[in-house]
Amino acid sequence: MGTPGSTPRTRSLPQAVTALCTTLLRDAYLPRIERALAELPPGDLWWRPHARSTSAGNLLLHLEGNVRQWIVCGLGGAPDRRERDAEFAARAGAGAPELLDALRVTVERACEVVARLDAAALAGRVQVQGFDVSRLEAVLHAVEHMSWHAGQIAWIAKLRAGAGHGLAYYADARLRKRNAGRRRD
């Protein structure tokens, strides 16, 4: 998911954008996070390389808070009770299954909100986290933010699991074969 041509054709650009955004959140980035956490050795969920960095556990808390604040609350009208600083301050807490469950629920709620947005709604403005943004900007922020942190979680998992990790998102052999005959400049 999340590759060119993977989103079904829709009748309008706004429908295509909202369909792609929900596909990326729910069907691309969330499964990548799940696969990364499956590779993370037991006990490393809250590991940090140093005091000024974040753990995979912190990133899960942060993603759940971010998607909830920007989409579920900011666009969907749910009350915003986010405590952003606590997402980064935590040094221990729930396990990966519980954190993933919370993120899954929030992503699903966010996708329901995004799927209802039409062209007029996407162009409308909202205040989120002190920023005045269009609803489209809010959706794109949450999508790119999740992509960014999914990559960080994957990096932590690969680092902690070592060279024997099994984390891959693409069929590398298939891509090498497809690209073998292409001209490289």
Image (tube, rainbow, N blue to C red):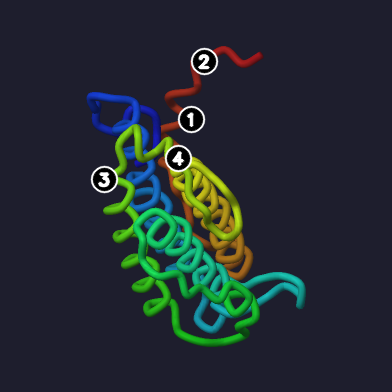
The residue pinned by badge 1 equals 176
Number of other residues with Cα within 10 Å of mark 1, as a class: few under 14, some 14 to 19, many 20 or more: few
Point out the frontmost of discs 4 and 1. Answer: 4
Q: Earlier in the sequence, mark 1 or mark 2?
A: 1
Q: Which mark is residue 116?
A: 3
| Cβ atoms at labels 3 and 4 below 8 Å apart | no
Q: Earlier in the sequence, mark 2 or mark 3?
A: 3
| Cβ atoms at labels 1 and 2 below 8 Å apart | no
- The answer to whether any part of residue 6 appears in the image is no
Cα distance in 3D space between marks 3 and 4: 12 Å
Point out the frontmost of discs 3 and 1. Answer: 3
Q: Quadrant of residue 64?
A: bottom left
Q: Earlier in the sequence, mark 3 or mark 4?
A: 3
Name the spot of residue 33 as percent of width and height, x first: 45, 60
Secondary element at image label 1: helix
The residue pinned by badge 4 equals 136
Q: Which residue type carries mark 1?
A: Arg
Secondary element at image label 3: loop
Q: Earlier in the sequence, mark 3 or mark 1?
A: 3
**Residue located 31% across and 42% down the image:** 117
Number of other residues with Cα within 10 Å of mark 2, as a class: few under 14, some 14 to 19, many 20 or more: few
Q: Which residue type carries mark 4?
A: Leu
Residue 120, placed above or below residue 97? above
Name the spot of residue 31 as percent of width and height, x first: 37, 57
Cα distance in 3D space between marks 4 and 2: 36 Å
